[in-house]
Structures are given as structure tokens and as C-alpha cells.
Image: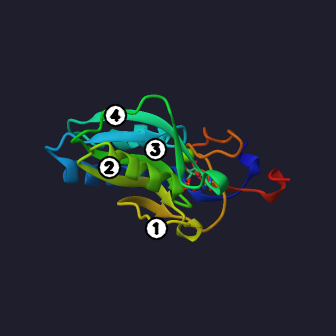
Amino acid sequence: MQNDIKKISVSEEEIKKIVTSLGKQIAKDYEGRNPMFIGMLKGAVPFMTDLLKYVLIPCTVDYIKASSYSGTKSGSLVVQGNMPDVKDREVVIIDDILDTGRTLLHFKKTLLDLGAKSVKVCVLLDKPGGRLVDIQADYVGGLVPNEFVVGYGLDYNEKYRNLPFIGVLKEEIYK
Ligand code: IMP
Ligand code: MG
């Protein structure tokens, strides 16, 4: 599996540093506010699991699966599974990567419509070059260029999520 990787974008060590500092920052910002963390399945799982080890404050943890569709269904958000009760909650959405921004923009709006008191976004990676809608993350682990990356939750056709680092796939893998 490692042979399919052209270059490492974020090493295991760098991930550990990012996760530690983001987690401590969030713990400080949300102290006494009982935040609700909502992880976006499946990509956010390794990141969220590691991150929350450093968010040592009372909080609740949920996961949902959401996707957005462009084209004919432009703007629609599909959520699989039950939405947690977000009324009056201070929500932090956790995701692996912010690319076009469609999914997180729609999901954030949905949470606010459902009565969340506040909604912030935390992503391990931001790919600003891919953005198609106006959304910024409040917590960002690192920036990546407009390349397709895999590992540490990120997949290509459901593969590579279990790599402990993040890397760029070799071109021949796409062919
Ligand atoms: P978007 O911001 O609505 O385009 O969706 C972001 C989602 O697309 C992420 O949560 C990933 O599941 C997926 N994604 C975007 N860029 C990459 C990438 O480089 N590698 C793997 N998945 C990606
Ligand atoms: Mg995803």
C-alpha cells in the first residue's frame, strides 16, 4: 500500500503535533461550554479519535454521514442516520479535509436551522485551491495544495484510510 504513495504530505509525527496543539486549543476555547463534537464519517474518524484525547473537558461526541450533491440537486444535503439534538448546543464539526466546502457549508447551515447555539468547523487539512463556496474553517491543522491525498482517514475508492500518514497517490493508481 505504501508503494502507491508518491510523496508524504504530512508525516505521522507531524500529524501528532497538529492534533495535540489543535486539541489543546479547542479545550481552552470551549472550557465550561459542554461542546458537542460531530464527526463526519468516515474520513474524520482517526483525526477525531486522536484529537479528543487532548480535549479534556466535558463534551459529547456524535458522528454522522453526510454528502452534498451538485448539478441537478444543487445545494441539497443528504444525511444518513439520526441527527443528534443540537438545540442550544455549541457544536464543533470535525472533518478530514475542506475541499470545495459544499458539504460543510450545507451541514453548518442545517445545524443552525435546527437551533444550534453556535457552529464551528475543525478540519485536519484545508485545500483552499479547491474551494467552490464561501466557507472557512475555524480550526485548521494544515494546508495542502490542490492534489488528491490519502491516509489517516482519507480514502481513494475506500482504500488507504488506514495509512498512519497522509500522502499523494501516484498517478498510475488513478488509471
Ligand atoms: P467538499 O469540501 O464538500 O468538497 O468535501 C470534502 C470531502 O471530500 C472530504 O470530507 C473528503 O471526504 C473528500 N475529499 C476532498 N478532497 C480529498 C482528497 O484529497 N482526498 C480524499 N478525499 C477528499
Ligand atoms: Mg469525507
- Residue ranking furthest to the left: 32
Question: Dot 4, crowdedness within 10 Å: few (<14), some or many (≥20)?
Answer: some
Q: Which residue is mark 2?
A: 112
Can you tell which quarter of the image residue 37 is in? Answer: top left
Q: Earlier in the sequence, mark 4 or mark 2?
A: 4
Residue 138 vs residue 119, the one in the foreground: 119
Q: Amino acid at mark 1?
A: Asp
First in sequence: mark 4 vs mark 3: 3
Separation of marks 1 and 4 at Cα, in angstroms: 27 Å
What colour-coding does the image apply?
Answer: rainbow
- Whether pointer 2 and pointer 3 mark residues with C-beta atoms closer than 8 Å, the reply is no
Whether residue 57 sits left or right of residue 174 in the image: it is: left
Give the image location of residue 80, x and y in percent: 52, 33
Residue bearing mark 1: 134
Q: CA distance from mark 4 to mark 3?
A: 13 Å
The answer to the question of whether label 4 and label 2 lie on touching residues, with beta carbons closer than 8 A, is no
Q: Residue drawn 45% across and 56% down?
A: 105
Closer to the chain start, of discs 2 and 3, is: 3
Reading the image, the residue beneath label 3 is 47
